[in-house]
Image (tube, rainbow, N blue to C red):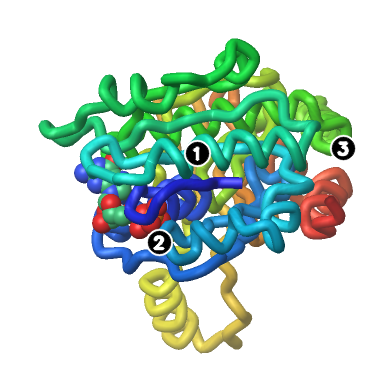
Amino acid sequence: MLFGPGGAGKTSLMRTTCLGYNFMKVLNLKPTKGVSRENFIFRGIMELSIWDLGGQQLYMDRYFSEKQRELVFSEVMTAVFMVDSVADEPRLKEIFDNFLNYIFEFSPQVEKAYVLLNKIDLQESKEDEIYELLIKDLTDDLKSKVAFTPVSVKEGSAQHRLIEILDYKIQQNTLALQRLGKIRHMLDQMKVTTLSEYFLFNQPDGLLIASTLGKFEHKPLQFLRFEIGSLDSNIYQIYTKIINLSNSAISPLELSTVIYESDNNYIFVREVSNGSVLMIFTKSKSEETFNTIINSINSEHFKNLKNFLNKNDF
Ligand SMILES: Nc1nc2c(ncn2[C@@H]2O[C@H](COP(=O)(O)OP(=O)(O)O)[C@@H](O)[C@H]2O)c(=O)[nH]1
Ligand SMILES: [Mg+2]
């Protein structure tokens, strides 16, 4: 659950983290009205439902009402509270205290509430003051269950923090770990005999799902969608022309693999499913290596991986 007053940056955070939007695209978001729920597949392995509770007072009061609070605050797996460090929100403390109390009351499985003090990129940001206000009068027990982080969606640190929180959840989620293990195994099978390393990325958020080198951290891919399809339109035009010139029949052209070349390696980038992209780095540049890769991305193992990823049975 992502909770907090209107204008805190919740919708911006979700769209930039999970949909690859850049910040410019969320600059002029209209405030969310009421409750909106969006589903995302994080890192290609864990399904997330994000509740963006429209932050206006009217709605806030409704969520906290005796009639609704249990419904709203139960069955939460991860609780994140977001606040605008610039705005003066007269009832901020009250909203925050209610949030904490109801989360821990109705979702006892939640171990920690994460608080994001957002917009620290702005000069007027007063995250220290807001921190003092929010932590004031909390019991020691509550204090130990709340983690505060100053962040900025604009600069990317909010997305980093959210990813960190969600990755921690993956580590605790047996189903996600099983799924990850299977994917790892399939990559290992494809790798055999090719002398190359395989990396699978989640397309919408650009994050690594799994690789034959294990987990590795990379700088976020500037939160751009990992798409190779944008070359498509131009290639198709040229392709059609050439085929016409050679008087052959035109077969459907589907751009699914791009090959890069360095002095010492090839890098293959291949779309696996709608949601993921496979990258293969060769360790040498021999013709033989090249062929083994072509074979591996046309193999049964590749088809299995594709089927598995397309099944989406979380
Ligand atoms: N300067 C700055 N503006 C932000 C940041 N995060 C969000 N905003 C802006 O704050 C406004 C409200 O954001 P929105 O995501 O709609 O907030 P929500 O009501 O919590 O969903 C939008 O105009 C965003 O562009 C940030 O880190 N820095
Ligand atoms: Mg919103």
Q: Is 206 on the left or on the right of 41, as rendered? A: left
Earlier sequence position, callout 1 versus callout 3: 1
Q: Are marks 1 and 3 in contact (CB under 8 Å)?
A: no
Kind of residue at badge 3: Leu
Q: Nearer the viewer, residue 245 or 58?
A: 58
Q: Nearer the viewer, residue 238 or 221?
A: 221
The answer to which image quadrant residue 287 occupies is top right
Secondary element at tag 2? loop
For label 3, the residue is 175
Earlier sequence position, callout 2 versus callout 3: 2
The answer to which image quadrant residue 68 occupies is bottom right
| In front: label 1 or label 2 | 2
Q: Residue at image x 42%, y 20%?
A: 136
Q: Is 76 on the left or on the right of 115, as rendered? A: right
Q: Are marks 1 and 2 in contact (CB under 8 Å)?
A: no
Q: As displayed, is residue 157 above or below residue 3?
A: above
Q: As displayed, is residue 313 above or below residue 29?
A: above
Earlier sequence position, callout 1 versus callout 2: 2
Residue 131 at x, y percent in the picture: 36, 23
Say if disc 1 is inside 8 Å of ligand 1.
no
Q: Is 7 on the left or on the right of 194, as rendered? A: left
For label 2, the residue is 56
Secondary element at tag 1? strand
Q: Are marks 2 and 3 in contact (CB under 8 Å)?
A: no
Secondary element at tag 3? helix
Q: Nearer the viewer, residue 125 or 130?
A: 130
Is residue 220 shown to the viewer in this render?
yes
Q: Residues within 10 Å of mark 2 (few under 14, many from 20)?
A: some
The Cα atoms of the two marked residues, 1 and 3, are separated by 26 Å
Residue 4 at x, y percent in the picture: 45, 47
For label 1, the residue is 81
